[in-house]
Amino acid sequence: MTGSRLFLAGLTGLALLTAHPALAAPQLRAQVRGDLPADLRTRIETAVGASERPSRNRFDARQRANVAAEEASAVLRSEGYYAFRVQPGVSEAVIAEPFVEVTPGPRFRISDVRIEWIDPAPVASIQALGTGRLQIAPGQPARAIDVVSAEARVLSAIQKEGYADAFIGPREVIVDHADQTLRPTFRISAGLPVRLDSLRVETEGRTRPDWLKGLTPWTSGGAYNPDSIANLEKSLVETGAYDQVTVALAPLEEVPEGGLRPVVVTLTDRKPHRLEAGASFASSEGLGADMRWTHFNRFGLADTSAVLGRVSTVDSRLGVEVTLPHWGRLRQSLNGYTAAFRRETSAYDETGIEVRVDVQRKRSEVAYVTVGAALDYTQTEEKSASASALLQREQVVGSLLGALAIDETDDVLDPRSGWRVDVRAEPTLLTGSVTLSYVKASLQGSAYLPLDGDRRTVLAGRAKAGSILGGTLGGVPASRRFYAGGGGSVRGYVFQGIGPHLSDNTPVGGLSLVELSGEVRHRLSDQWGVVAFLDAGSVGVSQEPAFDTLDLGVGLGVRYNLGFGPIRFDLAVPLNRRSDDPSYQVYISIGQSF
């Protein structure tokens, strides 16, 4: 079977799978009847939920109707409809269909909102702040979420003013059917303002207290702020060095009256070692195997150090990696990496040693800035422009790195919504066989759009462009040029298969790159999914990316959810196939393609 026929057969199978009755959109557990506002009907139907099978019998239908009535009643109360009427029922059809008849009645309104401060009452300015944060006014709909949210806003506001021991007492809510109003009275105790002392570290592990105390985001005597406490705890959890992290104020009874309040950090170290192994396969790149031995908190700095190795047809290496989180300050890490490597590709063979150091700063919850430097010693073999001779290069390569990454997606390995962007520039200096300086720059972005409410079908897209500025094709070593083709690039083509080639079909690489990808991802179940995709790419000999000479690849894939992310199997065919290109390519790896 040719590659195109294989693809068409797979596409037909995908269409049959997604059209199969068993995979049709699930139906409501019970029909919702009655004259309802559109938004209220939607909320009730969402609460009632869906079922992938009809009722088995009339008894089952009655049970569904009763459960649906309870769910509908809860929604009505939460939305301020306190004079509602909900009646469950079952149709007289041969296949009994459950339903709920809903009469919402009038919507009740907020009236007379009050705060009662439990002694000792805070100063007048704090009372005024609390009242201002209620943000509910007489006459607005009496939604339960608005009442609860108002109470939470008041508590949060006064805690951020230093009242760490503030708490909410039992609220009083009067629902008056005579005038169709709801009157909430909030009872809140503010306590006394708290001033913070230094950290008190409690751990039986290896963490150095002096390092941890240096990360304190407040000064002794500063006012309590819950965000500072929460951020410190979150930052320690994110290091991955601990099984359990707790950051909390010392109990009030341990503090003398008017004294400073210590902050207690309790740490439980995770097991110090972890062994990981992985594998990948691509029909053009062969089998790859990875192993990583990780040691946590070796230096008492919540650090991670690892020895890692990879054996594959294309890239084999043995290296050491060290990460120091919160280096010098919170949300800033120092990363070091060194490795000996051997690359054997169609374009070149390269052996070398690389050393890299970078500092990554987390600017927000989704944005990272990285600056770094690298020094490589390499010995490379590549073919001359006429393909008649081997060129041997011995180079020392120094480079700097500046990068910005923003990730607004909902999941690292299997995103279903959001977007990502990565911008980087690497000023580079070569010495040795050739002396040359240039800047290698790239921009990559991807976006994910769910096409239905439960996000079972997702449209995903990726675009990448790159350019080597100030370099020449003959001056830039083959190992430093751009290439396209393969599992992480344009599927359907062999690794490095897109772009200019020598007369013996050796890939040349280029000074510019364009890659585009589009996928439709559909989940058949919690475990299984299918994908249809189109990839495109070009490699140019000039510095300007070429969008008019794109090579295309199409294919189908299967995904199996491992819990932490999917394992993927992709089958792709090239649409601009060269005479010696295979008719299709197979790729197996963990995680979505982008």
Image: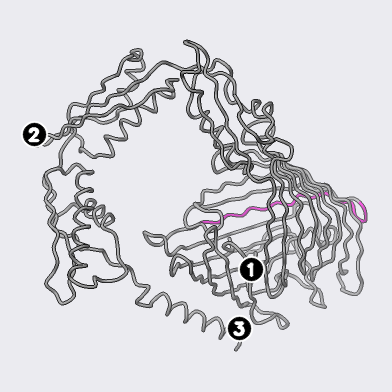
Q: Is residue 270 left or right of residue 171?
A: right
Magenta includes 182?
A: no
**Residue 515 or residue 237, whichever sits in front:** 237
Identify the element where label 2 is drawn: loop
Report x, y in % for residue 75.
23, 48
Task: Bin the neighbour count of mark 2 within 10 Å (Cα to Cα): few under 14, some 14-19, many 20 and up.
Answer: few
Residue type indicated by callout 1 = Val
Magenta segment main secondary structure: strand
Residue at which label 1 appears: 490
* Bounds of the magenta segment: 432-447
Q: Residue at x 55, y 34 (%)?
A: 233
Residue type indicated by callout 2 = Asp
Report x, y in % for residue 276.
68, 57
Q: Residue at x 34, y 77 (%)?
A: 21
Position of 303 relative to 509 (above/below): above
Mark before the other along the chain sequence, 1 or 3: 3
**Residue 271 or residue 427, whichever sits in front:** 271
Residue at which label 2 appears: 179
Q: Residue at x 51, y 48 (%)?
A: 408
Identify the element where label 3 is drawn: helix
**Residue 171 or residue 80, whichever sits in front:** 171
As drawn, the label of residue 3 is: 3
